[in-house]
Image (spheres, rainbow, N blue to C red):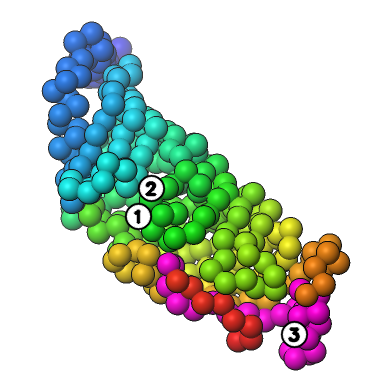
Amino acid sequence: MTTGSAASIRWFLYCSYAVVLSAVLLYVRFPEKEFKEYCIRKAESLFNGTKCTIGKITYEFPFGIRFDKVAFLLPDGPNTPLFELSSLNLSSPWRDFGSIFVLSGQSYSSNFSGILQAGQGNRQFSLDPLTIQNLDLSAMKPVNETLGRNLSGRLDYTGTYSAVVNQYLDGKAVGKVKLREGKIALLQPVLAMKEIDLQQVEMNIQYDKHRLQIVRGKANGIEMTADFTGMVQMITPWYLSNVTAKGDFALQAAYTRDNISARNELIYLQKQFKKTTIPFQVAGNLQNPAFQFGY
């Protein structure tokens, strides 16, 4: 063995020993209280204008940390959290320590996971890939209360997201959204429907600097089916964001068989538009969208 090779091996062993020793000392003497205070300050700096609470922090050997019961609230607002994480796990590979993080956790009954990578300067970051499974929309009470109607269902997302810290609406995302077992209450009845019972919705989306585009969407529900495209122009506050969508829908045979008024109106619309599917469009904002037939 050459002298250079022996020196390299010794250097590697010394570094490995130092890393393992540091990890062991962290595990044995983890300063939870001081670290929790630091993490709370850091989290509040990542989301300006919010107050953060963390239930518990646990060190996970060798380079991992688990956060339990993380919540963000308005400092002077109601005690209802704006957003909650049941758990968040962060770990960093030793070769990329501090620049790449593997994250996973639970929020609103969902499981999420992703690879978080810090960018160069300007506090940039990316989540690639990012996966969210089984997000319970009905559990997001602030969203339902703000919109003034009930939304429910299980939401999945597979894709990417990147942005600059505290400029999250200026970010970018590409991915696929799936909604299962969904229900959306309507502001006004449409073809005798007061709510839409959706078995499955699939959407390919692209988001870039405040503009969310639904490139292709397909819905399959108990009462109807639809193909659609759309766009949401995000602004602050989010519920006043402009929404536009258009597409074609058809009523399920079982629904028209049991609803005479809906069947009669459907026949009239089919004659008017001279097609079996009915064109529709949606315009307005997220809190108060308006539905109408035709393009």
Q: Position of residue 249 (x, y in %)?
A: 70, 73
Q: Which mark is residue 162?
A: 1
Is mark 3 in CB contact (under 8 Å) with mark 1?
Answer: no
Q: Front-most of 31 and 235?
A: 235
> At 66% from the left edge and 57% from the top edge, which residue is drawn?
197
Q: Amino acid at mark 2?
A: Leu
Q: Amino acid at mark 1?
A: Ser
Say whether residue 94 is visible. no
Q: What residue does disc 3 label?
A: 269
Q: Amino acid at mark 3?
A: Leu
- What range is drawn magenta here? 262-287
Q: Position of residue 251 (x, y in %)?
A: 76, 69
Is mark 1 in CB contact (under 8 Å) with mark 2?
Answer: yes
**For the residues marked 2 and 3, what is the alpha-carbon distance in whole angstroms?**
45 Å
Quarter containing the C terminus: bottom right
Q: Which mark is residue 127?
A: 2
Q: Secondary structure at mark 1?
A: strand
Residue 209 drawn above or below residue 244: above
Labels 2, 3: front one: 3
Question: Mark 1 or mark 2: which comes first in sequence?
Answer: 2
> At 27% from the left edge and 41% from the top edge, which residue is drawn?
79
Q: Position of residue 172 (x, y in %)?
A: 37, 61
Q: Describe residue 51's horizontal placement relative to residue 238 as left or right.
A: left
> At 53% from the left edge and 69% from the top edge, which residue is drawn?
187
Question: Mark 3 or mark 1: which comes first in sequence?
Answer: 1
Mark 1 residue crowding within 10 angstroms, few (<14) / some (14–19) / many (20+):
many
Residue 267 drawn above or below residue 45: below
